[in-house]
Image (tube, rainbow, N blue to C red):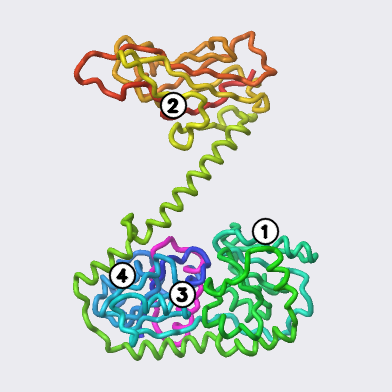
Amino acid sequence: MRIIITNIRLDQRSGTEIVTSEVARGLVERGHQVAVYVTSPLGGLAIDLRKAGVLVTERIEALSHFDPDILHGHHTTPFLIVRTLFPEVPALWFCHDAISWHDEPPVLNSIGLYVAHSIPSRNRILASPGIDPARVYTLHNASGLPFQEAPPPAQLRRVLVVAKYNAQHVNVVREACQERGLDVEIVGGGVGRLSSTLHKIFEQNDLVVTSGKAAMEAICANRPVLCADENGIAGLITPDVATSWFLRNFGSSIRRLPSEAASVSAELDLYNPEDFARTRTLLRPHLALSRYLDELEALYQQIAGHRPKDERLDFARALEMALPSFRIDGPLLPQSLDWKNKAEVLAAELLELKWQNFSFGDKPDARKLSFTINQLGQHALEEGWSKNDPQGTWLAQEARLTLPSRTNWSDFDGIKLEGALDLPACVDAPDCPLHIKANGTDADIKIAPDMKGKRQGYFYLWFAFPKNIDRGQDLQLQILIHGQRASTSEDVAGPKGFRLVSLHMTGNYRR
């Protein structure tokens, strides 16, 4: 058969990316022709798949002549893109996640089967109005790693933590392990350490802290698993919970313990080599990739003749729900607001760190400190830049900036200032719109000749420190805008007041 598999990305090593890679390889080995379409840049997994004979692309036009027999859809948006190109090809759609926006089930008649990988993802499909439960099938995940036959670790000495998306749980695990004298290694995208040989790292440790498909891989590699991730802690996978947790894909729905070091420590106490051997015996038939591929091929055959068309409105509605938007019920609104809030907090923290630790360094032009005067940057200025006189006179505006002595400002004779001013149209403006004082004394300002007359909207100048300035103190800068009366013309441009938009400071030259 000729099969197209879709996935939202193939540039990291997340669970669905590994599933896509293992399934594509397995199908090719069984004689099928496979193409993989993703909506992301292509990384190492894509290169490996191409070497194995899989057509991998992030451009839909590359599939225009593939002529598939089956569409195997992971994730809503890439599936709908391929569905647009091949509207009548029999299709299955797979739900991997019970929460994420990119796994919202598309309600379409042309989808022959909806396939869930766990009980929670099955419940998500069934909760979608318009999907017949008879069209929902559960196919539990597997692992492409072969079962290692060596004896399990006799005792725990080294612990591997897989931080998939962030490191929220890492400190809790580290604290519990350090109290017991265990060495801790941390890998994963959450700490910027992705690995294409995770199975080899499993072998170098005695226990793995992870979840989902990585938990299955660790068990195949003969390593006990404490099921935990950034979403919370479930506990050690033991014979009494092994099967029920597998049915939930060792995922978020089994988290049950407080994210505390005491919880982790109590679970570590449960490790017993004989118990782990029984756990592996229970899970072994479920984790075999051959079992997964057998069921998958049977599903392909089952829907091979399913060719109903979708109503245009149904397809448009599926696209509306899948594509990024900021509607109240849109898939990205909660995430986008959360990202925006986090970005603002991080930007404020970064600005404060720059402000506290700014140093010109040995190369004056190599470092630059930038301030953007907006919602995030206002606290860097002690006074604002938007006052105006109700009588129509533009007032001198002032900002006070402090460079502590530890920034080595005294190593320079002056500073270069560059930035943008939001100025009104005015008459008789000076060549330089700024007035600068350094520790209370006027600084000697030099403005580039080609910038004269261009002060409305931008400035670029140098100023030298007064000769009698005390270079052992903090540098207190007062930056003022010269006051000018506004034009009486009807087409006055700009806001009613001066406003600093941005400011760049760079050490000008060494003494």
Element on which disc 3 rests: helix
Which of the 4 quarters of the picture holds residue 135?
A: bottom left
Give the Cα distance between marks 2 and 1: 42 Å
- What is the crowding at mark 3: few (fewer than 14 residues within 10 Å), some, or many (at least 20)? many
Left/right of residue 485 with respect to residue 475 in the rendered view: left
Identify the amino acid type marked 1: Asn
Q: Earlier in the sequence, mark 3 or mark 4?
A: 3
Can you see residue 72? no
Residue 419 — which label? 2
Give the Cα distance between marks 2 and 4: 46 Å
Residue 80 — which label? 4
- What is the crowding at mark 2: few (fewer than 14 residues within 10 Å), some, or many (at least 20)? some
Residue 20 — which label? 3
Q: Relative to 136, is 484 above or below?
A: above
Q: Residue at x 51, y 68 (%)?
A: 14
Q: Relative to 197, is 333 above or below?
A: above
Question: Residue 401 at x, y = what percent?
Answer: 55, 23
Question: Residue 48 at x, y = what percent?
Answer: 50, 71
Pick whichever, 212 or 74, lies toward us.
212
Q: Earlier in the sequence, mark 2 or mark 1?
A: 1
Q: Earlier in the sequence, mark 1 or mark 4?
A: 4
Identify the amino acid type marked 4: Leu
Q: Are marks 3 and 4 in contact (CB under 8 Å)?
A: no
Q: Earlier in the sequence, mark 1 or mark 3?
A: 3
- Asked if residue 256 is among those painted magenta in the image, a careful observer would answer no
Residue 171 — which label? 1
The quadrant of the picture occupied by the C terminus is: top right
Identify the amino acid type marked 3: Thr
Report the span colored magenta.
18-46
